Image: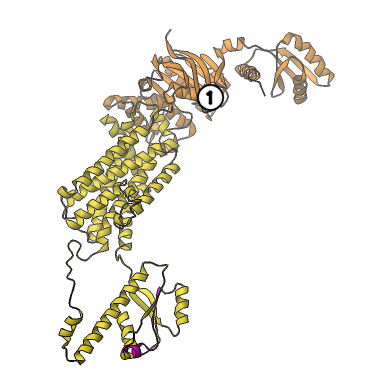
Amino acid sequence: MTLAIETTNLSRRFGPVTAVAGLNLTVRTGEIFGFLGPNGAGKTTTIRMLCGLLLPSEGSARVAGLDVATEAESIKRLVGYMPQRFSLYGDLTVEENLDFFAGVYRLSGQERRRQVLETLARVRLTERRRDLTDHLSGGLKQRLALGCAMVHSPAILFLDEPTAGADPPSRQRIWDLLYEAAAEGRTILVTTHYVEEAERCQTIGFMHRGRFIGAGSPEQCKADMAEDLLEVDALPVMEAAAVARGLEGVTGVSIYGHTLRVFSKSAAHLRQHLHEILTARGIAVKSIRAVAPTLEDVFMSLTRDASDGNGGR
Amino acid sequence: MLAVIGHVARKEARQILRDRRTFVLLLVMPIVLTFLFGKALETGGLRQIPSVIFNQDGSPESNAIVTAFSTYDEVQIEREVGTLQEAQDLLAQGKIKAAIVIPQGFMKQIETGEEAQLQLLLDGTDNNSAPIVEGVAQQVIQRYNAERAVKGLWARGVRPDRGQRLIQPVFVQTEIRYNPGLRYLSYVMPGVIGLTLQLLTVMLMAVSITREREKGTLDQLMASPITRSELILGKLLPYFGISLLNVVTILFVADRWFNVPVRERLPLLLAFCVLFVLTSLATGLLISAVSRSQFQAIQIAVFYILPVFMLSGAYAPIEAIPQAIRPISYLFPLMYFCRAVRAVTLRGAGLLLVWKDLAILGGFFLVFLYWAVLSFKKRVA
């Protein structure tokens, strides 16, 4: 299988700050690769380097087989980019925006017309094509931005938080479009900090402080989680959490509604111990059971490890 | 290349036309500015400088002097005051610029052959009006002296015309070539046209790229295969179109309203205006390419336009600028524009006389444009 994106020790510094620190990334052609990580993890910086907007400080990257340092302008013809911030002309109509970007990508005449109409239909904005972009709702703006990023039929799409702030139906519609594009053989690299969106990707990369702290398919990531997980149903839940946090062997506790998720090195050992201590403190324990982690659990676990590794908080 | 430039230009034009208020402003502002600047500078010199007279003598001779002063348009005798103190107070309060004092015994001194004096109290803070009042006083006294001398000679049997000749044997014969009325307005109009054209073009272009940078649209553009020249030339074109319209309206105002002779050498004049507009647009683009934000771009534009105002010879000849800083004047395209347009409109100079300035403006345009393209980076290093 060919690689759409391949980076080797890719790094970027801004003065004293290292935004991306030696990233090794491979994205196969035709897959949806999700970049997951907290704000400031280096996702946007990585995408900007891959799009040829930012020069790497160190390392190298190839996009569609072309070197980002020396062949950026050729890469730009082959990729589409949707920035995190809405970046279209508010004083132009939906159709004018699409037409402008199609022209900027050197489409002309009949071909440009066809691509614009096709894209309008694809992002379901044909009815709104004469509306000023400023007058669109947030979700529609995002769909238009996606349309502008792919009006020239790019082989690779870089989408920086394409669903940020969108309501669930809008998000669903964007993801439908992404699947459609992937089905046409396009490679998609999408960043998000919504964990449930990462579940939709074929491969995900957890980014933290400029490097990958885990990567693979969502299933694999869950299976690979280094910690065990217990779900504790106890009342009052806040007190139970405080007790659990103080126990030896417990690496993390998160509260979900009326249950706790307790991370530890070994659940088998902890389970009995936890039950006894909680009961002794007068906390009513309904159940304690080992559960499979969600991606969110994996994310929490990985960022905790990485933080500890870097000296922690 | 050309197709993309046209494509960008169409999009820019569409945005300009859609912003109705700004568009109307763009068309009306130059006319208003030319009119205002022109009106403000129409008279050129000071008139009706507020003054008072303290006629302490009150004799027929001193009254004749007072009457003589009142015939001059430059001096406005507000009234006669009763004491020297009053005149001094008015001067101190800034209510008058000059006090003309005719001391007691003025006539007597004249008649007994002693030296008589006319005294002037002038406000030196206003260095424009003081010399004008002094000049008027000199003329009044000169004329008075001459009249008295002619009368004196006549009393001794010399005919007045002969007496006149004896007193003033030499006259100056002046013939003013070009701008015969010595109209300051005719002199300053090229400067007004240049400043107006420059103000709009530089400001407009200066924010054109930075606005896209601020709104984030530049990011989307930079990720596309558009080249720097395509973007910059595409942005330049529609503003060039608007500026051409402005050239026409400004010249029209200059011709119709201010009677500045623009019609005689119209093609040459238009060539200068077009090249100057292009140079100014390129200056604005350069500012836009190096600025991070619209605010910064406007700051730089103001810092550029203000010295141009003072140093380009738009209002006064650059020879009035001290030698030490005069070389700076040669850095501004407006200086060459004013120099050449003055030559064309006032002296009727042809291409043969002004081709150098035309070439210099063309050079400025190419250098600034190339510099703007180079300063504009598609990628952050």
A268 shown above or below A55: above
Query: What is the quadrant of residue B17 in the picture?
Result: top left
Instruction: Please identify the quadrant where the C terminus of chain B is shown.
Output: top left
Residue A72 lies, in percent from the top left, at 38, 21
- Chain ID, mark 1: A
- Vertically, is B200 above or below A205? below
Q: Quadrant of the N terminus of chain B?
A: top left
**Mark 1 — residue?**
A19
Q: Which chain is yellow?
A: B
Residue at 29% x, 30% y: name it.
B4
Q: Position of residue A73 (x, y in %)?
A: 36, 23
Q: Is residue B143 above or below residue A163?
A: below
**In this structure image, what is the colour of chain A?**
orange
Residue B242 in the image, given as x and y percentages of width and height: 29, 45
In percent of the image, x 82 and y 18: which residue is there? A279
Q: Is residue B10 visible in the rendered structure shown here?
A: no
| Location of residue A5 by image quarter | top left
